[in-house]
């Protein structure tokens, strides 16, 4: 497969040929940065872990050059950060037994500006994988690059043959919780077991954790909190939950506006809060 960036790479932990590794994919994660997949697509990773009939592949779209850094990483320039984050992402792919880990190496600016190369790379990879489900960022995320990745992915999905599209496209939380979504709009991704693996996958990214961002504690704590606060009148049913929104309709209908879908969700949240206050006032 020909990808646009000279630094792009398809890493296959078990050594299978890249084409065959991608073709076995059933669950695909498409994220902006190194470590995003291990935060938002953990449901897909666990669904496939140590399974011969299910395989998770990850795509990281950007090069990871602009991350915050301190401590031993404070003196690292962008090129050094790109290199260390690439190594960390490949370690995570090995720990999680991914089918393949794709590093597209695009600058964040290119993703946000809608560069054609980003869309073309994503379309080619989705066609090669033809996954059953894709996990990506949600459209209400607070990070510009996260939202841009999802918009570029939607464009790519509308260009590929319908036979290669997944049955479901799910937008998950990273830089903004989705617990505000009304229950009828929430997609619950329950996480049970393998808590050690979840911690290990997050812990691989030392450049972020030691560099000043405790994504490991934050992500694990949020999953546990969601499981507890999901339902006020029932005992906890899961040890962790990731909330998501269903983006499948946007994948199939190019006339549907992503902004409209988010606006509908926000309106439903507003109605839920106001109607409860009126009822109890």
Image (cartoon, rainbow, N blue to C red):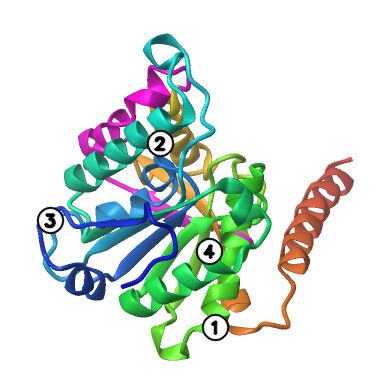
Q: Which residue corresponds to mark 3? A: 50
Looking at the image, tell me whether mark 2 or mark 1 is earlier in sequence order.
2
Q: Which residue corresponds to mark 4? A: 118
Q: Which residue corresponds to mark 2? A: 82
Looking at the image, tell me whether mark 1 or mark 4 is earlier in sequence order.
4
Looking at the image, tell me whether mark 3 or mark 2 is earlier in sequence order.
3
How much space separates mark 3 and mark 2, taking CA atoms?
Answer: 29 Å
Asked if the stretch drawn in magenta spans residue 191, the answer is: yes
How much space separates mark 2 and mark 1, taking CA atoms?
Answer: 30 Å
How much space separates mark 4 and mark 2, taking CA atoms?
Answer: 18 Å
Asked where in the image residue 76 lies, by quadrant, the reply is top left
State the image coordinates of residue 140 (x, y, percent, origin top left): 67, 51
Q: Nearer the viewer, residue 50 or 242?
A: 50
Q: Which residue corresponds to mark 1? A: 159
The residue that appears at 51% across and 50% down in the rendered structure is: 243
How much space separates mark 1 and mark 4, taking CA atoms?
Answer: 13 Å
Quadrant housing the N terminus? bottom left
């Amino acid at each position: 497969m020909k990808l646009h960036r000279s630094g792009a790479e398809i890493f296959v932990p078990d050594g299978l040929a890249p084409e065959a590794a991608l073709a076995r994919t059933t669950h695909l994660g498409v994220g902006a940065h190194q470590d995003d997949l291990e935060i938002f697509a953990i449901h897909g990773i666990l669904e496939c872990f140590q399974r011969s009939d299910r395989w998770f592949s990850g795509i990281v779209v950007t090069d990871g050059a602009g991350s915050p850094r301190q401590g031993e990483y404070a003196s690292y320039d962008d090129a050094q950060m790109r290199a260390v984050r690439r190594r960390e992402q490949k370690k995570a792919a090995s720990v999680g037994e991914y089918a393949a880990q794709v590093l597209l190496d695009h600058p964040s600016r290119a993703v946000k500006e809608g560069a054609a190369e980003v869309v073309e790379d994503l379309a080619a990879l989705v066609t090669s994988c033809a996954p059953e489900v894709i996990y990506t960022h949600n459209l209400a995320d607070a990070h510009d690059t996260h939202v841009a990745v999802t918009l570029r992915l939607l464009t790519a999905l509308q260009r590929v043959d319908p036979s290669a599209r997944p049955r479901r496209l799910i937008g998950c939380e990273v830089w903004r919780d989705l617990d505000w979504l009304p229950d009828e709009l929430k997609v619950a991704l329950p996480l049970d077991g393998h808590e050690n693996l979840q911690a290990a996958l997050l812990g691989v990214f030392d450049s972020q954790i030691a560099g000043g961002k405790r994504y490991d504690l934050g992500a694990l704590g949020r999953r546990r909190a969601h499981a507890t606060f999901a339902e006020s009148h029932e005992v906890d049913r899961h040890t962790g939950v990731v909330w998501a929104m269903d983006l499948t309709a946007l994948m199939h209908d190019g006339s549907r506006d992503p902004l409209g879908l988010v606006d509908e969700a926000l309106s439903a949240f507003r109605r839920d809060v106001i109607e409860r206050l009126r009822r109890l006032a």
